[in-house]
């Protein structure tokens, strides 16, 4: 199944109902005083979040969603019925943009938002009665509705994003630390859509990691699967930068590390004008050497030093396959996430 995270729809509130022109019927009089009621109010378009849905797939069924219009007023001062609101249920974290790409509302931490107001009902002729004109023949039309075309965008709400070259072992790591079971294989571009995994670190702490398709040098120019998947981890607090330490790829682990960081910089440059954008290159990174089961102690310590010279601190060293150092790594990650949350 394709990962659906973007949908374009038109939303419309309801028009106001027209006011009514009516005159009382009285037994001895041909025409009594005006008694036309007001039109009903049109329904609003309300956006509401739900934790029970996690994709926008259901919204693909229709292109246009509309609230009901208000009904016309009636004689005997009876108001028309208000139109029913249209409630659009979206997953938490859905961002709604207009067609120029500007954010209208970000449904993160907001449970309900009135996007469009229904039109007001028109006044009936009774309203226009005064000492000069006691028999007004006119009523107001209902107010127009509002209509807008919007783009809904759902970003995965993950705390930690895993970045790295294809085949670095990102999916293996996710399957090792969470209940998620992404596809794992010994060739690049195994992961084609992002996967989320919930990691339990102790009885009361858990966090969400996102495994995204691997990046390669030139990704910002469309090489490999491109960098469109980075948008799924724009919101994460931290990155795990996973590096294949085995050397079996034929590339230098440190080159891989630098190449990916460079791609993040390019991504930032290309997106810096987007409203609400939060740059990736400066996000805290956990630098993690994976596949250390393939290295001797000596090789590993040399490699660690190379990284330390560049980053200023010693990288983590794990084996996603054998599980070496994974427990400690997860604990450290959880500590760091809690610290970020407190800030
Ligand atoms: N020896 C060894 N192999 C590993 C380790 N972790 C992952 N691998 C192997 O590396 C290969 C790629 O693993 P994946 O988890 O699919 O890699 P990925 O980073 O998700 O790759 P893409 O989805 O293509 O980006 C698989 O054959 C794994 O078994 C490790 O710690 N040690
Ligand atoms: Mg993968």
Image: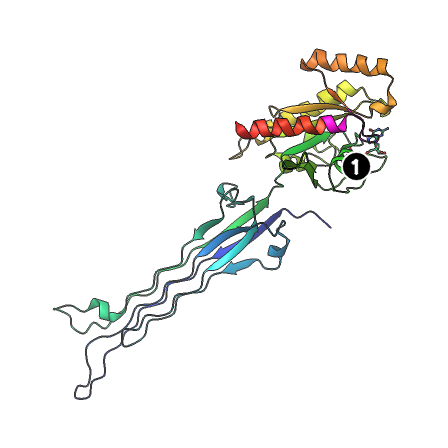
> With 279 as the anchor, is 314 left or right in this view?
right
Name the residue nearer the viewer: 319 or 325: 325
Residue beneath disc 1: 189
**Quadrant of residue 288 within the rendered picture:** top right
Q: Where is residue 321 shown, x and y percent of the image?
A: 83, 31
Q: In this view of the protein, can residue 245 be seen by the observer?
A: yes
Q: Residue at x 68, y 28 (%)?
A: 331
State the image coordinates of residue 100 (x, y, percent, origin top left): 51, 42
Q: How many marks?
A: 1
Is 54 situated left or right of 77 in this image? right
Q: Is residue 35 magenta?
A: no
Q: Is residue 322 magenta?
A: yes
Judged by its main secondary structure, the magenta piece is loop
Residue 267 visible in the current orientation? no
Identity of the residue drawn at 52% across and 35% down: 276
Corner quadrant of residue 61: bottom right
Is 54 in front, or is 193? Answer: 54
The answer to whether residue 257 is above or below residue 276 is: above
Question: How many neighbours does mark 1 have within 10 angstroms: few (below 14), some (14-19), or many (20 or more)?
Answer: some
* Mark 1 lies within 8 Å of ligand 1 (Cβ measured): yes
Q: Quadrant of residue 40?
A: bottom left
The outermost residue toward the front is 203
- Residue that extends furthest to the left in the rendered view of this protein: 131
What residue range appears in magenta? Answer: 318-328
On screen, residue 42 versus residue 150, left or right, reads: left
Helix or strand or loop: what does disc 1 sit on? loop
Quadrant in which ligand 2 is drawn: top right
Which residue is pictured at 52% across the width and 49% down the height? Answer: 150
Residue 118, x across and y down, in percent: 40, 58
């Amino acid at each position: 199944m394709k990962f659906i995270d973007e949908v374009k729809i038109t939303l419309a509130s309801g028009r106001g109902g027209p006011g009514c022109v009516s005159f009382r019927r009285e037994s001895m009089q041909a025409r009594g005083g005006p008694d036309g009621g007001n039109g009903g109010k049109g329904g609003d378009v309300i956006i509401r979040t739900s934790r029970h849905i996690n994709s926008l797939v259901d919204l693909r069924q229709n292109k246009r969603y509309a609230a009901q219009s208000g009904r016309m007023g009636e004689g005997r001062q009876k108001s028309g019925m208000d139109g029913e609101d249209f409630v659009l249920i979206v997953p938490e974290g859905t961002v709604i943009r207009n067609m120029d790409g500007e954010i209208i509302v970000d449904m993160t931490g907001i449970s309900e938002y009135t996007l469009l107001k229904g039109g007001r009902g028109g006044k009936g002729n009774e309203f226009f009665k005064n000492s000069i004109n006691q028999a007004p023949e006119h009523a107001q039309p209902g107010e127009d509705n509002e209509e807008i075309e919007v783009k809904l965008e759902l970003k995965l709400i993950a705390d930690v994003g895993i970045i790295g070259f294809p085949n670095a072992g990102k999916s293996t790591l996710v399957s090792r630390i969470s209940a998620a079971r992404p596809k794992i294989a010994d060739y690049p571009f195994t992961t084609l859509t992002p996967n989320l995994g919930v990691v339990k670190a102790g009885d009361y702490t858990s966090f969400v990691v996102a495994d995204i398709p691997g990046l390669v040098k030139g990704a910002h120019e469309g090489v490999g699967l491109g960098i469109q998947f980075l948008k799924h981890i724009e919101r994460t607090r931290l990155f795990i930068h996973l590096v294949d330490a085995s050397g079996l790829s034929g590339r230098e682990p440190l080159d891989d590390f630098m190449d990916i960081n460079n791609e993040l910089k390019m991504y930032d440059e290309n997106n810096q004008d987007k409203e609400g954008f939060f740059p990736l290159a400066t996000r805290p990174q956990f630098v993690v050497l994976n596949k250390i089961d393939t290295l001797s102690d000596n090789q590993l310590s040399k490699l660690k030093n190379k990284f330390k010279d560049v980053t200023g601190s010693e990288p983590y060293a794990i084996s996603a396959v054998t599980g070496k150092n994974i427990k400690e790594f997860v604990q450290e990650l959880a500590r760091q996430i809690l610290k970020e949350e407190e800030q």
